[in-house]
Amino acid sequence: MGRRVVVIGGGAAGMSAAAKARRTDPTLEIVVYERSGFVSYGACGFPYAIKGEIARVEDLIVRTPEQFARQGIQALVRHEVLEIDPDRQTVRVRDLRSEREFVDHWDDLVVTTGGQPGRPPLPGIDLAGVFALRQVEDALAIKEWLNEQRPRSGVIIGGGYIGLEMAEALAAHGISLTLIERLPQVLPAMDADLASQIEAELIRQGVDLRLNQTVQGLVGDERVRAVIAEGQTIPAEIVILAVGVKPGVALAQAAGIGLGPTGAIAVDDHQRTNLPQVWAAGDVAEAWHRVIQKPVWMPLGTTANKQGRVAGENLAGGDARFGGIVGTVAVKVFALEAAMSGLSLARAQAEGFAAEAVQATAGSRAHYMPGHQPITVSLVFDRNTRRLLGGQMVGREGVAKRIDTIAAALQAGWTIDDLAELDLSYAPPFAPVWDPILVAANLARK
Amino acid sequence: MGRRVVVIGGGAAGMSAAAKARRTDPTLEIVVYERSGFVSYGACGFPYAIKGEIARVEDLIVRTPEQFARQGIQALVRHEVLEIDPDRQTVRVRDLRSEREFVDHWDDLVVTTGGQPGRPPLPGIDLAGVFALRQVEDALAIKEWLNEQRPRSGVIIGGGYIGLEMAEALAAHGISLTLIERLPQVLPAMDADLASQIEAELIRQGVDLRLNQTVQGLVGDERVRAVIAEGQTIPAEIVILAVGVKPGVALAQAAGIGLGPTGAIAVDDHQRTNLPQVWAAGDVAEAWHRVIQKPVWMPLGTTANKQGRVAGENLAGGDARFGGIVGTVAVKVFALEAAMSGLSLARAQAEGFAAEAVQATAGSRAHYMPGHQPITVSLVFDRNTRRLLGGQMVGREGVAKRIDTIAAALQAGWTIDDLAELDLSYAPPFAPVWDPILVAANLARK
């Protein structure tokens, strides 16, 4: 009989690990314990299912437990792992339906417990109509609330990716929206001058944007009716908490699995933890950042998939390596696309680089083509070494995938001079003869 | 008084050289001789002006001679340079309006005489209604013919970029179209299996596509009425010649300016020719190909702009370098986007690489997002060194700029393993969690 692999968590990282392990070694016994009712879903699609652009939340499910079973992977939903015993190589599991507890043995353990959305200890946080967004159940509950309660007003707490995507989603339901962000800008990973274009778009779309504001509490009867921020009462028949995601490390930490400086599980480039035969991947783990050459915690679906696959291959006897990230993200905010890769100017300076930034605006298509839109490109580089450190872009088209060129340049360790030499594609419907990236790179060279 | 710079040709390369020289050294005297009636125009936009997507051909003009004059650049249209005397450092010029000839002196000469569309010696080639497409006058003449003659049938001879773009342009006028290509496929730079998707799109759009066919002649009275191909008579009230562009080297060759193995002017990475103080740039010149490490002739607007700028900076005392190309091109064919960078499989094998190709198809957006379209990605690599040699893509969205990631990988000299490690952007409206490029790279690694 094959070795037994236990995976904790059936999200992107966990199911990637399970599937890759299965393909690599058909003799393995593989079981996945997932606390929620679903495995293997596109969590990044939740806002679009809530918006109604995708008909049903269930459309986000990639594979069901039944489909995994046919692959020889046992994916058990509503099963919560309560404890890891690394010495006995066991986990203690509770079947949330039967309330039954049992102990399972593993030869290899993969920890993919994901991130945990922040639930600030605010008065009224447990009122009906207050939602975080992490699991399928959250998305289903929000959709149900929208359909049954038809809220006319809403407050989103937090101006990160999920807060911004949820603004678009709720606005599509005709909800009068307020977005409250504690910091002076939305998308804190982006430099303020580019983030201001996103803020302008939110306002243009009718969102009451409140920066630099702190929420004091939520009020209502059984259900939420308003949010109190800076002494003001803001009507809210629905509230989305999009604040302070943290790595879900409680289980790992209790078992002695080592955390890194970021508070997430420390892993090497094979997704090994400090404990033998214990692997970690996805939003619970750190990832190596190629630009700053140290581990960061930056929970993203792409990284979860890649790390999961590496863990799965290695525990099955392979020798895969996760080379790290450069921190590439893209987000759609109403009609705007925003994307970044590498370091913002603020981050680059904080990391000790002699960083400066240039900003250029150029067209998404040839200037004479109808529909062309300005793209603002900001490049961050080290003025001493001329090394490219990061790029950010905002515009109404051609942004989200254009950032990939910056991602490649960062992985290659290029200078701004290398970047300026790029032979980028040109055709009038898709780009001007000097692509916005080249315009910015030429400006940076001066 | 400053040194005198003569530029032959007022297209992208010539005007880029003039403008950059002016910015680099304000004391230079700069004169540009242009045979046609226009300088500084976006030639790649011609098909879209003919299609009617751009209102007027004149909208493609970036700057007029009057605007250049205000920058201190004398741009003389309808002036043909008849001869270069490199010993005396003069050119003999004919003013095509006055028929007057004169001799002008130069300290530096920039040859940007561009490409020359093929005009095969076919019977009937000089009939009215038969057009090549190179200059503003050609585009104007085609538009006039369309407006005044309202042709109901048309033949395009040649299935390269211009032929394909002109098919879309003429179809928009309700013209029943035949496209005749001598080779067994359209876009010969692309591998046949991907080009076949373009062929399918042409047929889907109602184009009568005839591959492997040779044109014997054109027939008509004063104006063209039909094209004879393989013994068949194909009605044609308009004919577009989109065949066999060659570098326009006659003038250069007569002056002893050295040509390279491709038949275009040989230049070093400073855009110097073999003659002192004589520079060349754009479609008349070769360009260094980074992947095969030798000069190629691949006339493209992006290269013309870059080479022109390098020539202009260097003749003005600068030290700029053109690092070369990787051969990136993109083209829109009706609703399809096609793009490639680097070598096709056929070309890679011809260049002696142990080349093979993998092909993957993945979505342009997350699988659950409405509007997602399949993108076919082909990667060409050397099976011994694992080095990436080229990439090709076809699809209905997200192709033209996605190729830039391949362009960056080629410039970096990456293996398929490096490519597979890329941290590409992900958001459901713009990409699946495994971008099509990564899907193909993972397949290539196996």
Image: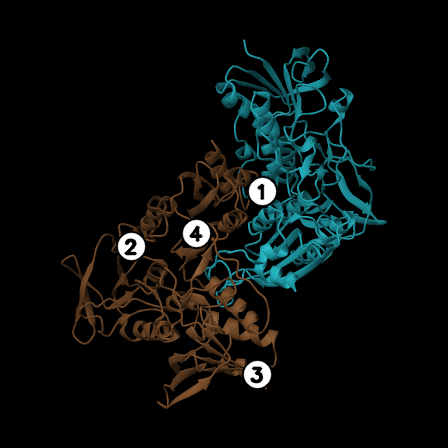
Chain colours: A cyan, B brown
In-front residue for pair A382/A289: A382
Instruction: Specify the label residue B206 is tagged with.
Output: 2
Residue annotated with mark 3: B70
Instruction: Specify the label residue B339 is tagged with.
Output: 4
Q: Are marks 2 and 3 on the same chain?
A: yes
Label 2 – label 3 distance at C-alpha: 49 Å
Residue annotated with mark 1: A48
User: Which percent across, then down, holds residue B197?
Assistant: 35, 47
Q: Earlier in the sequence, mark 2 or mark 3?
A: 3
Label 4 – label 2 distance at C-alpha: 22 Å
Say what amino acid the circle numbered 3 marks: Arg
Q: Nearer the viewer, mark 2 or mark 3?
A: 3
Q: Nearer the viewer, mark 1 or mark 3?
A: 3
Q: Earlier in the sequence, mark 4 or mark 2?
A: 2
Label 1 crowding class (10 Å Cα cut-off): few <14, some 14-19, many 20+? many
Q: Which quarter of the picture shows residue B115?
A: bottom left
